[in-house]
Amino acid sequence: MRQIGFGLFVIGVLSLAPRGVSAQDSVIVIDPDAPVVEAVPTGPPIEVVQELIDIYNDSATTRLAGNFILPTGSQARAHLALYRGILRVAGTVEGPVTVINGDLVIPAGGVITGDVLVVGGRFTILPGGRHTGRRRVYRESAPVFRSPVGLLAFRPPPQSLAEIASARTSFQAGRIRTTLSLETGRTYNRIEGLPIIVGPTFTLPTLGGTEGKLDAQVIFRTAGDQTGVRDEFGYTLRSEWIFSGTIAGGLGGQLYSVIESVEQQPLSSGESGWSAFLLSRDYRDYFETRGGEIYGWLDPSSHLHLEAGWRRDQERSVRVADPARLFRNNEPWRPNPLIDDGHYSTFRFRADVDTRNNKQAPTTGWLIQGEIERSSSDDASPVALPSEVRRPIPTFRDYRFTRIGFDVRRYSQFSPSSRVNLRVVGGGWLAGDPLPLQRRVSLGGPDLLPGSGFRAITCAPATFVNAAQPALCDRYLATQIEVRTRIHIGLTHLLAGQTFYGLDRLLSLDEADIVIFGNAGHGWLTGEGPGRVPNNRIPRFGEWRKDVGVGIDTGSLGLYLAKSVSNSDPVRFTVRLERRF
Amino acid sequence: MRRTVLLIGILGATLTGGAQAQGRLQVGLFLTPSQTEGGPPTPRVRTSHLTGDSRWLEVLNDQIPVRLRFRLELWRSRALNDALDRAFQWEALLRYEPLFEQYSLTIINRGRVTEERRAATVADLDTLLQAGIQVLLLPRQTGNFYFTVTLTITPLSDSELSDYERLLQGDQGPPTGAGSSSIGRRIRRSFLNLSGLRSIQLEDRTETFNVTVIPPR
């Protein structure tokens, strides 16, 4: 609300023009690059708001609400106070007048002989009207509301939907600013249920525009673990030193005990959470990691982000905790696969190049993300896997492996309403010993290959049966292409002004993209031997899984039909809550 | 059968009326040359003859605000495919204020009221709209460019109207409840829907221009 304070001030200045003003035919100028004025306290002073409340609630005050006209010839000898409306004084008022979040107008013949206080509105004296007395006008509305008993009270500031789902309060002691927060982990899974994160963040501005930050959070897991293997709560203790300027960056360190997912696909964390909560379909696998990390990052330009870190942690298998779900309560959860438990030391490096014109709905630009990590362990206890999948992990020396991941996206627009987007994503084993289970990959499912079933490619031999369907591949590579055409739906207009219970806004039904897409991808075991692809090769394109499809994407809801062209799988219907990529 | 004929009649009248309205109304995109030789011109968006259609005027005079939603796009002209360079969107709210017997044009930029202009008569309002809005959406690199503009004109729905009223009042609190005018407005709106005056989309684009110099801002 405060953001519009300045705008209202502008209105206030401009609206002082008298009645019958001619059109101001000077050109209106808008500068899109002008800095956005952040929320600043521009409302009426707190003492004025308190004065309003005192006046309105005073039993001697004549209270009005809504539009009110004091007719010509009538006379009022009282303190008039009007809340939300227009007070038009065509008669005579002998006494003060207060208008709260409304306008005061004195037309021809109207007289006010007393102090006038208008907050959140305009005070207009038309020709022939008269006012004697002190005049105070505040264009910004007063943060007050009228209670059911007719008295005014302070109105707390409104909260956004995200804020409603979390609570946050800040206070300052000396130079240290403290923020206490309570929020969800923004996901839901079959291991933790709904993680709830609570804790303070301390921020200390230091010399040269740098900033120190200490973040301590406890993660409460709403789903209890009956096996006792997993802790009932997790934590993150993070300290960062951040500098900004021409080159931004920072250094940090953290101690943590959190639940991590094995792969970041086939659905985003939020979508996977909704799927788990509503339909008992958790598309991800998880493990617990406990340890510490030091890291640093650098942003040499607005398009480039570099990050490196070293961590030492203990990674452990966790079991399904059977949290509540809305539907399919009788169906068992898919088991969570075991991982290769142990202590791992990992060095990682990440580089991002992002030239997209819009992060949420890009129409042009590149997004290139790459990450490489080198890990070692001296006590990894591997899960027994078929020899076709993995040769034994060494126990007479440190276990070492290197893994890589990349995601390259190109967004381009061919006309104001049509776009073509391309994506190449892949990753997996690069060097060293075979990957542990928690670093292996798979393919198939709503994101990369929606025409194929969940984990259609796991690289498991036919004889290997495991209800958890673990990802066993060493590498994967997938490409996606989509053509988007923007169409005008205008459902809000077809609904003839009905709000459609707010869904029209949620689903952005005014406009949508028709999406025609094609995907191809493959996951494989690398190395020498039958059923494997040599390390320096990728499988022939003819062996890849491919699908085509069509859908409609409203921005916050996407409905897609996809058909595999590699086999006779049926047409699959997918609902997405985010853009495909 | 009788209902079908009636519906076809209404549909025909709607389409005819819509076509007439679109024929008079137009959005124009004009370029103001740069003071620097080879510099980028500045686009100006003009809306013409909005009040020339009596139905839009009736809508305004019936105290139903009209929303003008502009989207200005700067395109880089290339050999194979053109590329969207930048885009900017803003809204203008057109209202008649019976208390002051004047029209007002409120510019809403990035969710905030940034400017308000007033006009005493319909002719003044037309002058105001035709004076246009200059948008400093300029190329940041040299090359060949052109602008496109899309204008969507819509009578506000009740819920949108409520939101706008609260925005203009600087109030985000709960509404105080529908007033007596709400029922009348709903009746008028149902007539609007029958007459097809729900939404009109207009477009325009400039010629391609060449930018060889980017002056410092």
Image: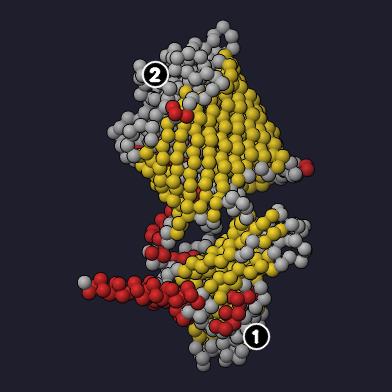
Circle 2 chain: A
Q: Position of residue B73 (x, y in %)?
A: 59, 59
Task: Name the residue type under label 2.
Answer: Pro
Which is nearer the eye, A20 or A522? A522
Q: Residues within 10 Å of mark 1 (few under 14, many from 20)?
A: few
Kindly identify the residue that appears in the image at 67 percent across and 76 percent down: A26
The kind of secondary structure element at disc 1 is strand
State whether residue A190 appears in this view.
no
Rate crowding at label 2 as few (under 14), some (14 to 19) or many (20 or more) other CA atoms within 10 Å: few
Identify the subunit bearing mark 1.
A
Q: Amino acid at mark 1?
A: Thr
Q: Considering the image in quadrants, where does the N terminus of chain A appear?
A: bottom right
Residue A146 in percent (x, y) is at: 48, 67
The residue lying furthest to the top in this view is A396
- The figure's colour scheme reads secondary structure
Residue A371, image quadrant = top right
Q: Residue at x 33, y 33 (%)?
A: A568
Q: In the orientation shown, which residue stands out farthest toward the left?
A: B1
Q: Position of residue A490 (x, y in %)?
A: 43, 61
Q: Find the residue positioned furthest to the front.
A: B79
- Residue, x 69% and y 68% (percent of image)? B32
Horizontal side of residue A484 vs A108, given as left or right: left
Residue designated by label 1? A132
Query: Of the residues under marks 2 and 1, which one precedes in the sequence?
Result: 1
Query: Mark 2 sits on what residue?
Result: A461
Residue A17 or residue A227, whichever sits in front: A17
Question: Is A260 on the left-hand or right-hand side of A34?
Answer: left
Which residue is pictured at 66% across the width and 83% down the height? Answer: A133
Relative placement, left or right, of B189 versus B92 is left
Q: Is residue A301 above or below residue B1?
A: above
Front residue of B92 and A122 = B92
Secondary element under disc 2, as helix, strand or loop, is loop
